[in-house]
Amino acid sequence: MLNTLKKSLFIALFLATGFAHAQLPADYKVVLLTENFPPFNMAVDDKNFARDDGIDGISADIVREMFKRAGIDYTLTLRFPWDRLYRLTLDKPNYGLFSTTYTPERQPLFKWVGPLAKTGWVLLAAPGNDIKVSSLQDAAKYRIGAYKNDAVSQHLESQGLAPINALRDQENVKKLVRGQIDLWATTDPVGRYLAKQEDVSGLNTVLRFNDAELYLALNKDTPDEVIERLQKALNEMRAEGFIDDITENYL
């Protein structure tokens, strides 16, 4: 009886002190991918390739701290285009991608840690354009620009619309002011941030059609222990006010 009690106490101590982390190989590392999606993740020099300290933004700072607290090693690379990063994360074990919008359609495709931040989906019109719509179906008669394989574009397609997809969301700013598209389907506040970078202001919000949350999406073969440790770290950061402090630094 005494031996059984000692064994139970040892197991409890083993789990409580974090030695259970040894389940992961000593050289375990997550390959993190991201893109220019300001103010959530972006290259310091505004280019389409960056590594590690050359990347900042709300989500980038949160993810770094999350991995540090979880004691999990990683590499971080910003690349282009999103479509390629999305497919790499779908296909390769131990790959992760952020900031990824969580949707019911995507839910079974990845393992998720989050939310990192909250956003909204909007249809924007060029300054001075007085287009008015009451629903996405009402907007279907217009030329709508979107970002290829982005959650916003995927949602439009799921609703029967046929957005004109660009490989860079910045291209849609130029198309909108040139009259090549009538509406721009994008994420708020990302769209306005990108427009400001292109010296475009005064965009009109024609329709806000969804509120969304941004997550870290990990390949389905990622060990559950990794997910649990990262989520625990994120929950602690949120409770401490770390998430709010980082967000306020950028907005």
Image (spheres, grey):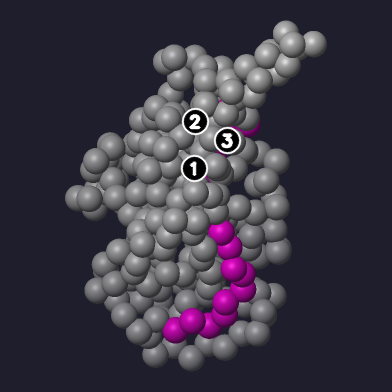
Q: Please provide percent x and percent y for residue 218.
A: 55, 36
Residue 84's mark? none
Say if mark 2 contacts mark 3, CB within 8 Å.
Answer: no
Q: Residue drawn 29% across and 76% down?
A: 200
Pick the quarter of the image with the N terminus: top right
Q: Mark 3 points at which residue?
A: 227
Q: Relative to the observer, which residue lies in front, 185 or 65?
A: 65
Q: Mark 2 points at which residue?
A: 95
In this rendering, position of residue 227 left or right of residue 137: left
Which residue appears farthest toward the top when viewing the image? 3
Q: In the rendered image, is residue 103 in sight? A: yes
Q: Distance between the residues labelled 2 and 3?
A: 12 Å
Say if mark 1 contacts mark 2, CB within 8 Å.
Answer: no
The amino acid at mark 2 is Tyr
The amino acid at mark 3 is Ile
Q: Residue drawn 59% across and 23% down?
A: 13
Q: Report the magenta stretch's main SS.
A: strand
Q: Please provide percent x and percent y for residue 137.
A: 69, 75
Q: Mark 1 points at which residue?
A: 233
Mark earlier in primary sequence (1, 2) = 2
In this rendering, position of residue 138 left or right of residue 70: right
| Label 1 neighbour load within 10 Å: few <14, some 14-19, many 20+ | some
* Quadrant assignment, res 169: bottom left
Q: How far apart are marks 3 and 1 (CA)?
A: 10 Å
State the extent of the magenta-drawn residues as a range. Answer: 204-223
Q: Please provide percent x and percent y for residue 239.
A: 50, 56
Mark earlier in primary sequence (2, 3) = 2
In this rendering, position of residue 149 left or right of residue 160: left
Q: Between tags 3 and 1, which lies in front?
A: 1
Image: 161 above or below 75: below
